[in-house]
Amino acid sequence: MKFVDYVTITVRSGKGGAGSVHFRREKFEPKGGPDGGDGGPGGSVIVQGDPSLYTLLDLRYNRHHFADSGEPGGGSGKSGKAGDDIVLRVPLGSVVKDAETGEVLGDVVNEGDRVVLAQGGRGGLGNTHFKSSTNQAPRYAQPGEPGEERDVILELKLLADVGLVGFPNAGKSTLVSSLSAAKPKIADYPFTTLEPNLGMVYLGDWRSFVVADIPGLIEGASEGRGLGHQFLKHVERNAVLLFCVAADSEEPGARYQTLLDELEAFSPHLMAKPRLVALTKMDIVGPDLAAEWVEQARATFPDGVEVIPVSAVARTGLDRLKERLWTFVEQERAEAE
């Protein structure tokens, strides 16, 4: 399935039905009073969160959504039928914006969350509502209110607890596959990951969290270079950021700082998120030089940065990494509650 995280659609709600001008016509009731019914409301266009969806692909190929209008009222106080609503299912994490103003209309985070994109017009009142002691036979009713039409932007920001950030070939996809049951595409060339991959990490004792492999960044990604810039938004919802730096990097600390600068240029509030560094590909160093290699690498990082050496291939350091990530995830969930 193709990963689509941004679409623009056109929505239009239905017009309300007109109220009825009608009078009772019964035998022996030559002057029956007004009994015109109300018009039915127009249908609305609504988005609703669905946890079974992971992409906005369906909406990319179906961009126009027009709800039905309400039917006019009838005699004997009969109300017109309401127009059917259109409910568009979207993945959790979808942000809804007005395409013209940029105003955020809503944020779909939980299953069943709803955001009304276009409210259906109200039905007009029938003439029975306008009867009074001075006007016992009103010959007018309200027209239905018009519907709304607008262009709407739907932008998906993945709901994952941990976001992996790193340069191409930093071992992110291999790490995700080792931490979870995910099966991302892995190969030895730049930009193997062309779209985010999600994996569920289980620690036992009913503990679990979701990790997202974000496509590799390059220097200047926040300015639109490479592939990673279009996916930087997905790290905005993560509880913790895991920076992946390959152990064979010439200056691991400098690589980390470049990644940090790109995130800050994209969104300064990302700097407030807790972060760890996974020193990946430790299997290429060998067990004899591992301790010395890690010490030299740690010396290149700023003070206070926690660096955890791991090897997804040899499956070393993974348990410690998962426990440290869980500490931050658990704290974030407690604060959210």
Image (cartoon, grey):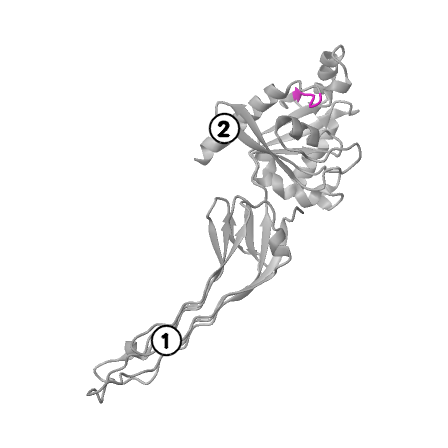
Instruction: Give the extent of the magenta segment.
Output: 308-313
Above or below residue 45? Residue 199 is above
Above or below residue 279? Residue 210 is below
Residue 322 picture location, percent across and down: 58, 24
Left or right: 243, with 134 as reference point: right
Residue 68 picture location, percent across and down: 48, 68
Q: Residue at the spot x=59%, y=42% of the render? A: 158
Three-letter amino acid code at the position of disc 2: Glu
Residue farthest to the top, as pictured: 288
Residue farthest to the left, as pictured: 28
Q: Is mark 1 on a helix, strand or loop?
A: loop
Q: Can residue 100 be seen in this view?
A: no
Three-letter amino acid code at the position of disc 1: Gly
Q: How many marks?
A: 2
Give the residue pinned by disc 2. 330
Q: In which quarter of the image is the C terminus?
A: top left
Left or right: 325, with 130 as reference point: right
Residue 299 picture location, percent across and down: 71, 18
Give the residue pinned by disc 1. 73
Q: Nearer the viewer, residue 61 or 244?
A: 61
Left or right: 318, with 76 as reference point: right
Above or below residue 155? Residue 289 is above
Q: Is mark 2 on a helix, strand or loop?
A: helix
Q: Residues within 10 Å of mark 1 (few under 14, many from 20)?
A: many
